[in-house]
């Protein structure tokens, strides 16, 4: 008796198309990339453009590679919102649940905090006038979610917008309390598996609780699938993945924010998604991590980057990509774009002093020649970090930092006179360092320094 064949698993990879096949002018995409390059303060690490559900442009800048799972910073918030949506649909939570009924505060709360709901957390409408992270940590260093409940809002909840990291952290804490799982584990069968995604890791605070407002690591392709899911109203590969109606609710404008400093941050806020110009909606994170939905054009733009001028990246997209999406495109333009996307790499020869910061606690203790370049030994907080540096290309190193954590670097170097100049990229983050060492001394500078203390050790991630 023969064994019945297992049903075939659906192909969850994003389909591809030439730009002209989906009405995209490849020259306009080239113009966008050229504009970002020319700006001088914007550095792309990867880009994916989807039109009508098909990938028509995709690229990584060496040493970044397709399988790298990079730190999303606040783009993590949109995944917290998604977990919240599942919990609401499953009856574990409700939008109008009071926060204090779901997360027991450590002391008496004020009257405004007592009325705060989960919807207020999701919409950044807690009544606070500014981010409360420092005050929440001061109130409870071990649990900033409960610490935020000790920070009295200046206004009634729902009356004012303030981008407030502990608002998301508290929402994530409530979801994790209600489900009994981390955000990653809760989302795995509901979101990641239906999209064919292998998630990265989510940094935690306290241990055992994913930091809902930052710290998630994911690949660019996974972000593209996530964006397409929301663009299609919660369906992917013909299957309803998100709860019915959640995508529309999460992407809707819930809180006005006209006082924000940049035009694409003034168009209103949804449930952990920003409204933008030209009918766009997006999740984004510090230094240019973007999932941009363009419903009117039936398109998704995904980028990872290292820039402190995120508005400039969006300005370039509106100036060049929107006309490109008007088409019609041509096979000649397709070829021009394909050539532009080949053999991309970071422009390490270009100095950008406006975004570099001197680091005085990372030391250079040794430089050793090797067959392919050098071994550069750095020291930070008593940790010795031997980084392989390539002479003619990028060389990767997995550094053990202790307690099951590590850092993945890619480095290349060159000599300038009697100095070694090495660029060390932390490929699981947007960040890189430049190390100069020679007879005259050494220096370490950061290109887009990590938020908080510039640190290699602090950016270490879990290792199996």
Image (cartoon, grey):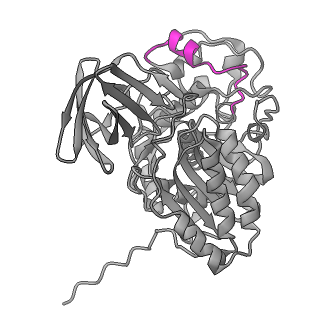
- In the shown orientation, is residue 386 left or right of residue 336? left
Magenta segment's dominant SS is loop
Quarter in which the C terminus is drawn: top left
Image spot of residue 460 (x, y percent): 33, 32
Residue 19 in sight: no
Residue at image point 57% right, 32% down: 171
Rendered view: 16 above or below 32: below
The quarter holding residue 198 reads: bottom left
Name the one closer to the observer, 350 or 44: 350
Residue at image point 76% right, 63% down: 323
Residue 267 on the magenta span: no
Highlighted magenta segment, given as a residue range: 124-142
Name the one closer to the observer, 97 or 204: 204
Residue at far front of view:
417
- In the shown orientation, is residue 107 left or right of residue 117? left
Rendered view: 138 above or below 215: above
Image spot of residue 399 (x, y percent): 25, 36
The quarter holding residue 240 reads: bottom right
Residue at image point 69% right, 40% down: 311
The quarter holding residue 429 reads: top left
Image spot of residue 137 (x, y percent): 51, 15
């Amino acid at each position: 008796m023969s064994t019945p064949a297992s049903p075939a698993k659906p192909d969850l990879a994003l389909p591809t198309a030439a730009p002209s096949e989906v009405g995209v002018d490849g020259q306009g995409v080239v113009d966008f990339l050229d504009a970002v390059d020319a700006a001088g303060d914007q550095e792309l690490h990867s880009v994916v453009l989807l039109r009508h559900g098909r990938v028509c442009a995709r690229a990584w800048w060496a040493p970044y590679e397709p399988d790298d799972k990079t730190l999303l910073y606040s783009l993590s918030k949109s995944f917290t919102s998604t977990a919240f949506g599942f919990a609401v649909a499953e009856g574990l939570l409700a939008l109008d649940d009071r926060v204090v009924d779901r997360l027991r505060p450590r002391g008496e709360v004020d009257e405004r905090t007592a009325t705060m709901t989960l919807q207020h957390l999701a919409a950044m409408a807690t009544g606070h006038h500014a981010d409360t992270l420092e005050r929440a940590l001061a109130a409870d260093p071990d649990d900033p979610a409960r610490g935020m409940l000790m920070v009295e809002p200046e206004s009634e909840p729902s009356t004012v917008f303030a981008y407030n990291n502990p608002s998301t952290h508290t929402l994530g804490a409530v979801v994790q309390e209600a489900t009994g799982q981390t955000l990653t584990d809760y989302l795995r069968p509901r979101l990641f598996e239906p999209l064919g995604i292998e998630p990265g890791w989510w940094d935690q605070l306290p241990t055992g609780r994913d930091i809902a407002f930052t710290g998630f690591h994911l690949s660019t392709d996974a972000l593209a699938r996530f964006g397409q899911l929301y663009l299609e109203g919660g369906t992917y590969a013909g299957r309803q993945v998100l709860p019915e109606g959640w995508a529309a609710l999460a992407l809707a404008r819930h809180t006005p924010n006209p006082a924000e400093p940049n035009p694409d941050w003034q168009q209103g806020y949804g449930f952990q998604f920003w409204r933008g110009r030209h009918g766009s909606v997006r999740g984004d994170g510090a230094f240019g991590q973007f999932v941009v939905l363009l419903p009117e054009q039936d398109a998704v733009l995904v980028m990872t980057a290292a820039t402190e001028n995120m508005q400039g990246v969006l300005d370039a997209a509106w100036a060049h990509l929107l006309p490109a999406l008007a088409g019609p495109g041509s096979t000649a333009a397709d070829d021009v774009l394909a050539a532009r996307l080949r053999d991309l790499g970071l422009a390490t020869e270009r100095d950008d002093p406006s975004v570099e910061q001197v680091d005085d606690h990372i030391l250079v203790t040794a430089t050793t020649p090797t067959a392919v370049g050098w071994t550069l030994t750095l020291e930070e907080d008593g940790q010795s970090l031997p980084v392989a540096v390539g002479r003619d290309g990028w060389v990767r190193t997995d550094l053990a930092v202790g307690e099951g954590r590590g850092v993945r670097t890619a480095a290349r170097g060159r000599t300038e006179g009697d100095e070694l100049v090495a660029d060390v990229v932390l490929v699981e983050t947007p960040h890189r360092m430049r190390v100069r060492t020679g007879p005259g001394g050494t220096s370490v500078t950061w290109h887009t320094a990590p938020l908080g203390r510039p640190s290699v050790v602090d950016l270490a991630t879990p290792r199996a």
